[in-house]
Image (cartoon, rainbow, N blue to C red):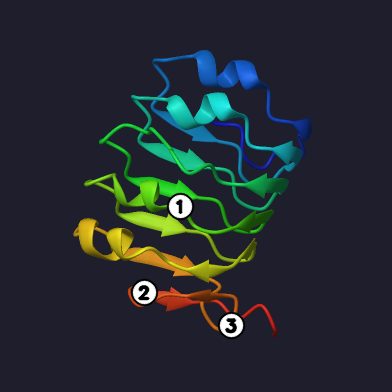
């Protein structure tokens, strides 16, 4: 499902997460608001999740149940907050994880650093908001 760069506004429909055959959700660079529907955290065939540059709020749940085929998660440029959950370390094929330009805080769980051997791009706000020992890049929100 590709719908990036369309100026869509409003919340993400929770029904989108009920389409079990989805392997791609690309809703980046719109004007989406509200929280990420819980139904999106249980898509077992998904490989690519792009929700960057919207106005999404809330926190990520402790348990995210994406498929082991997940390769890319792009959540940067929103207003997400809270801590980065350990469950993001459960995707052995994850290559790109970009969480910067949000309001996350705390320490990146060690399990993410240890379990994601294919991770080539991991970016978060790790200069003063988030401690990260394995980020490939740090984004400084103070500049």
* 10 Å crowding of disc 2: few (<14), some (14-19), many (20+): few
Extreme residue toward the left, this view: 117
- Residue denoted by label 3: 128
Looking at the image, residue 28 sits to the left or right of residue 90; the answer is right
Q: What is the distance, in whole Å, between disc 2 and disc 3 at their CAs?
A: 16 Å
Q: Secondary structure at mark 2?
A: loop
**Which corner quadrant holds the C terminus?**
bottom right
Whichever of callouts 2 and 3 sits on the residue coming sooner in the sequence is 3
Quick check: can you spot residue 99? yes
Quick check: can you spot residue 1? no
Q: Secondary structure at mark 1?
A: loop
Residue 2's spot in the image, x, y percent?
54, 31
In the rendered image, the vertical position of residue 130 relative to residue 42, given as above or below: below
* 10 Å crowding of disc 1: few (<14), some (14-19), many (20+): some
Looking at the image, residue 69 sits to the left or right of residue 51; the answer is left
In the rendered image, the vertical position of residue 28 relative to residue 132, given as above or below: above
Looking at the image, residue 61 sits to the left or right of residue 71; the answer is right
Whichever of callouts 1 and 2 sits on the residue coming sooner in the sequence is 1
Point 52% across, 14% down: residue: 18
Along the viewing direction, whichever of 143 and 80 lies nearer the viewer: 80
Q: What is the distance, in whole Å, between disc 1 and disc 3 at their CAs?
A: 18 Å
Along the viewing direction, whichever of 47 and 90 lies nearer the viewer: 90
Point 22% across, 56% down: residue: 115
In the rendered image, the vertical position of residue 70 relative to residue 39, given as above or below: below
Count of numbered marks? 3
Residue 79's spot in the image, x, y percent?
71, 56
- Residue denoted by label 1: 85
- Residue denoted by label 2: 136
Point 60% across, 76% down: residue: 129
């Amino acid at each position: 499902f590709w719908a990036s760069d369309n100026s869509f506004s409003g919340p993400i429909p929770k029904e989108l997460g009920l389409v079990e055959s989805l392997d791609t959700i690309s809703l980046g660079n719109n004007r989406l608001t509200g929280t990420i529907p819980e139904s999106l955290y249980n898509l077992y065939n998904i490989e690519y999740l792009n929700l960057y540059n919207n106005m999404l709020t809330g926190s990520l749940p402790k348990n995210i149940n994406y498929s082991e085929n997940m390769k890319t998660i792009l959540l940067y440029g929103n207003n997400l907050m809270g801590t980065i959950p350990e469950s993001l370390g459960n995707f052995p094929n994850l290559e790109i994880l970009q969480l910067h330009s949000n309001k996350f805080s705390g320490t990146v769980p060690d399990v993410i650093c240890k379990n994601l051997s294919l991770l080539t791009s991991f970016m978060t706000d790790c200069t003063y908001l988030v401690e990260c020992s394995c980020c490939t890049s740090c984004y400084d929100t103070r500049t």
